């Protein structure tokens, strides 16, 4: 379908939050433009980016005259504004579980799975730095709690909260792409077989292959 305005995503492909938004656009089959913004560059986010995102984070988003920041509301907008498969469940209960999964990701999983385990035990050693073992230990404990909580959202469903992928699946897939590279993931995932099956299904999706390259984080 042709749209009057192509959405513009401001961010970097290394960011799990930018990847989550790109996954959403890919699943909806919406053409978009990605304008690279590196918030880890010397001096931090470029000054012009602060007009898009006052906290200097990524992604930021434009669609015509609309400007948004923060991944979760942008993805809800994309799902509701564009044609394509629905990425939010039909029932209030399932939508609540979807929101709960996204909150788990943002408040607990991102810090433990990505920064505590991937960055400390994969990225730091790759550049010759020593991991902070106290951070790793705390992240390991928090990660186990996160995985258990995610497994319980919809125990019999093939996706995180139901029978079809939702914004929750797209939000968490980039984090798992990094987390599963950490040595600790092998043991942690032994107690999360449902999540192992879920992610095996996610990474076979063409959208994930296009939107989720690995290294670096934001």
Image (spheres, rainbow, N blue to C red):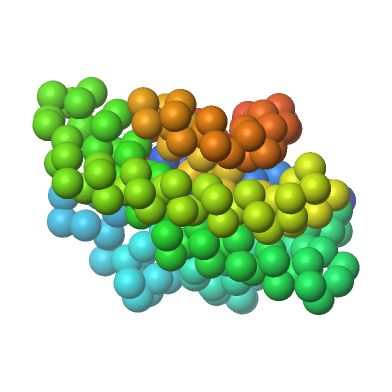
Q: Is residue 24 left or right of residue 112?
A: right
Q: Position of residue 173 (x, y in %)?
A: 58, 43
Q: Position of residue 151 (x, y in %)?
A: 63, 49
Q: Is residue 140 left or right of residue 78?
A: left
- Residue at 80% x, 47% y: name it: 156
Q: Can see residue 47? A: yes
Q: Which of the 4 image quadrants contains residue 21? A: bottom right
- Residue at 61% x, 67% y: name it: 100
Pick whichever, 68 or 212, lies toward us. 212
Pick whichever, 184 or 175, lies toward us. 184
Q: Position of residue 215 (x, y in %)?
A: 38, 32
- Residue at 27% x, 60% y: name it: 46
Q: Is residue 177 left or right of residue 91?
A: left
Pick whichever, 188 or 62, lies toward us. 188
Q: Is residue 165 left or right of residue 32?
A: right
User: Does residue 162 sit above or below 177 in this rendering?
Assistant: below
Q: Position of residue 172 (x, y in %)?
A: 56, 49
User: Does residue 99 sit above or below 180 in this rendering?
Assistant: below
How many dots with numbers? 0
Q: Which of the 4 image quadrants contains residue 130? A: top left
- Residue at 85% x, 49% y: name it: 163
User: Does residue 153 sit above or below 213 in this rendering?
Assistant: below
Q: Residue furthest front?
A: 191
Q: Can see residue 61? A: no
Pick whichever, 94 or 84, lies toward us. 94
């Amino acid at each position: 379908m042709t749209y009057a305005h192509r959405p513009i995503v401001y961010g970097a492909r290394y960011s799990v939050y930018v990847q989550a938004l790109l996954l959403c656009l890919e699943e909806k089959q919406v053409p978009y433009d990605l304008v690279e913004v590196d918030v880890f560059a010397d001096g931090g986010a470029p000054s012009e980016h602060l007009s898009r995102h006052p906290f200097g984070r990524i992604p930021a988003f434009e669609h015509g005259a609309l400007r948004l920041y923060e991944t979760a509301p942008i993805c809800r907008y994309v799902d509701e504004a564009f044609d394509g498969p629905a990425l939010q469940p039909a029932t209030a209960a399932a939508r609540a579980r979807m929101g709960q999964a996204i909150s788990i990701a943002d408040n607990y999983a991102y810090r433990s799975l990505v920064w505590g385990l991937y960055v400390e035990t994969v990225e730091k050693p790759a550049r010759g730095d020593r991991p902070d073992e106290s951070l790793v230990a705390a992240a390991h404990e928090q990660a186990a709690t996160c995985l258990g909580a995610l497994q319980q959202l919809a125990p019999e469903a093939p996706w995180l909260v139901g029978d079809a992928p939702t914004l929750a699946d797209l939000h968490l897939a980039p984090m798992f792409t990094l987390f599963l590279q950490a040595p600790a993931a092998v043991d942690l995932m032994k107690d999360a077989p449902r999540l192992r099956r879920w992610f095996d299904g996610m990474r076979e999706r063409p959208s994930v292959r296009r939107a989720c390259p690995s290294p670096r984080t934001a």
